[in-house]
Image: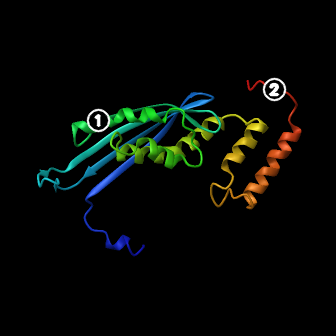
């Protein structure tokens, strides 16, 4: 048990984030993110008004993802549980994400488009988490069939230097790169019908 584990006292707040990916067709998925904030004890507003314990945020974001590299085709948000009615006006801001690729710089671009007086920091936080989940969801959907060698090469390029495992000079990247090259040499020439 870690040193911090033993120092935990009463639980006062939980933020739960769940992200699920649903198939649309072979080239598209819908990534649905749900964020919920729950307070377990009474608290006070800035105006010194007491608030009871309970759920203070409940929001859902859906992103239609497609392409390679993965790109947000469409976006929508619902905010059924918010502390202030005005919070719901931020849901429309997610439409600004349409057309955005999920590549290096995704987090900065999301913040540039959603932070500020028209957005919601909680929606932004959820969408930032959804970016990497969207990539995993697209990989799961595409992985239902063996990839064409040129698609595998594009995916490998996308993953290059994204973490310690996929660093360009690392053993995993080098091994997979050679496997992809060999598959490309063995593949028949010309376009192939995937079905």
| Residue visible at 81% across and 26% down in the picture | 191
Q: Position of residue 144 (x, y in %)?
A: 66, 35
* Cα distance in 3D space between marks 1 and 2: 48 Å
Q: Of circles 1 and 2, which is in front?
A: 1
Q: In the visual, does 26 lie left or right of 30?
A: right
| Residue visible at 36% across and 49% down in the picture | 16
- Label 2: how many residues lie within 10 Å, few (<14), some (14-19) or many (20+)? few
The vertical placement of 97 against 45, above or below, is above
Q: Quadrant of the C terminus?
A: top right
Q: Position of residue 33 (x, y in %)?
A: 43, 40
Q: Judging from the image, what secondary structure is the residue with disc 2 in?
A: loop
Towards the viewer: 45 or 118: 118
Q: Quadrant of the N terminus?
A: bottom left
- Label 1: how many residues lie within 10 Å, few (<14), some (14-19) or many (20+)? some
The vertical placement of 168 against 109, above or below, is below
| Residue 93 visible to an observer of this rendering | yes
Circle number at residue 191: 2
Q: Which residue is mark 1?
A: 88
Residue lying furthest left in this view?
49
């Amino acid at each position: 048990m870690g040193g911090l584990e033993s120092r935990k006292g009463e639980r006062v707040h939980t933020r739960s984030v769940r992200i699920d990916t649903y198939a649309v067709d072979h080239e598209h998925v819908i990534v649905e993110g749900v964020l919920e904030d729950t307070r377990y004890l009474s608290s006070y507003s800035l105006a010194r008004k007491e608030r009871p314990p309970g759920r203070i945020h409940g929001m859902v974001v859906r992103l239609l993802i497609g392409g390679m590299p993965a790109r947000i085709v469409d976006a929508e948000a619902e905010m059924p549980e918010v502390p202030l009615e005005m919070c719901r006006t931020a849901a429309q801001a997610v439409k600004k994400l349409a057309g955005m690729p999920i590549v290096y710089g995704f987090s900065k671009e999301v913040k540039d488009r959603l932070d500020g007086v028209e957005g919601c920091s909680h929606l932004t936080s959820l969408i930032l988490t959804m970016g990497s989940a969207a990539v995993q969801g697209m990989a799961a959907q595409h992985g239902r069939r063996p990839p064409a060698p040129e698609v595998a090469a594009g995916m490998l390029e996308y993953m290059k230097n994204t973490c310690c495992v996929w660093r360009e000079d690392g053993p995993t990247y080098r091994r997979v790169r050679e496997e992809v090259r060999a598959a490309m040499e063995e593949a028949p020439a010309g376009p192939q019908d995937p079905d």
